[in-house]
């Protein structure tokens, strides 16, 4: 016989556990996305430069839209560990610039030595930037790559490949 005032037996129904799992996912997913938005891969080697020889390893990236440019800042782990800037300008086309590691005058990685890699100096000059379709904090994320085999007018040799996504 059952008690008329009792509630239905919910033993074995996973609603409480599923609700907690769903809530945990809603909280953790945005936090994980904020840890590192971009993914990078590759390196660039510079030899014979007036600024010395170096190998740049890509570890992170940021989009340049907040600075009024369409492209990415692909950089090393610290503020002064170098960078490769891949941008597309509607008037001048694709541009690649390299920031020399250890050249920044300020602790926050600003006022650094940066040099242009002109397409005319390269046997291989491939660079792309395109939208990913994602927007974070009103910034459209980009992806792309750059592949270089170049000898600049001053004898500097630049070679390598970097890829970036979600910057």
Image (cartoon, rainbow, N blue to C red):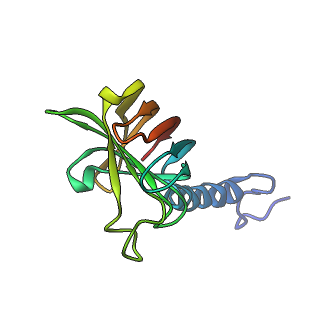
The answer to whether 120 appears left or right of 101 in the picture is: left
User: Between residues 15 and 84, which one lies in front from this camera angle?
Assistant: 84
Residue under the point 51% across and 53% down: 60
The image quadrant of residue 144 is top left
Q: Which is nearer the eye, 16 or 160?
A: 160
Q: Which percent across, then down, holds residue 96?
A: 34, 40
Q: Position of residue 13 (x, y in %)?
A: 75, 51
Most extreme residue toward the top is: 123
Residue drawn at the location 47% of the way across and 38% of the way down: 157
Q: Nearer the viewer, residue 23 or 122?
A: 122
For residue 37, side relative to residue 108 (left or right): right
Image position of 150 (left or right of 31): left
Q: Residue at x 36, y 42 (%)?
A: 154
Q: Looking at the image, which residue sits at the far left?
A: 91
As drawn, the residue found furthest toward the right would be 1
Vertical comparison of 113 with 128: above or below: below
């Amino acid at each position: 016989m059952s008690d008329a005032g009792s509630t239905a037996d919910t033993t074995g129904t996973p609603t409480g556990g599923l609700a907690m799992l769903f809530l945990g996912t809603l909280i953790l997913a945005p936090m994980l996305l904020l840890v590192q938005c971009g993914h990078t891969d590759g390196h660039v080697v510079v030899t014979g430069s007036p600024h010395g020889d170096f190998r740049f390893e890509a570890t992170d990236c940021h989009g340049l839209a907040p600075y009024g440019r369409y492209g990415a800042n692909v950089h090393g782990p610290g503020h002064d560990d170098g960078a490769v800037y891949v941008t597309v300008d509607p008037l001048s086309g694709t541009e690649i610039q390299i920031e020399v590691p250890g050249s920044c005058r300020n602790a926050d990685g600003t006022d650094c030595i940066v040099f242009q890699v002109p397409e005319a100096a390269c046997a291989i000059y491939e660079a792309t930037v395109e939208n990913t379709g994602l927007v974070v904090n009103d910034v459209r994320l980009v992806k792309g790559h750059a592949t270089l085999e170049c000898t600049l007018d001053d004898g500097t040799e630049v070679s390598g490949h970097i890829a970036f996504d979600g910057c």
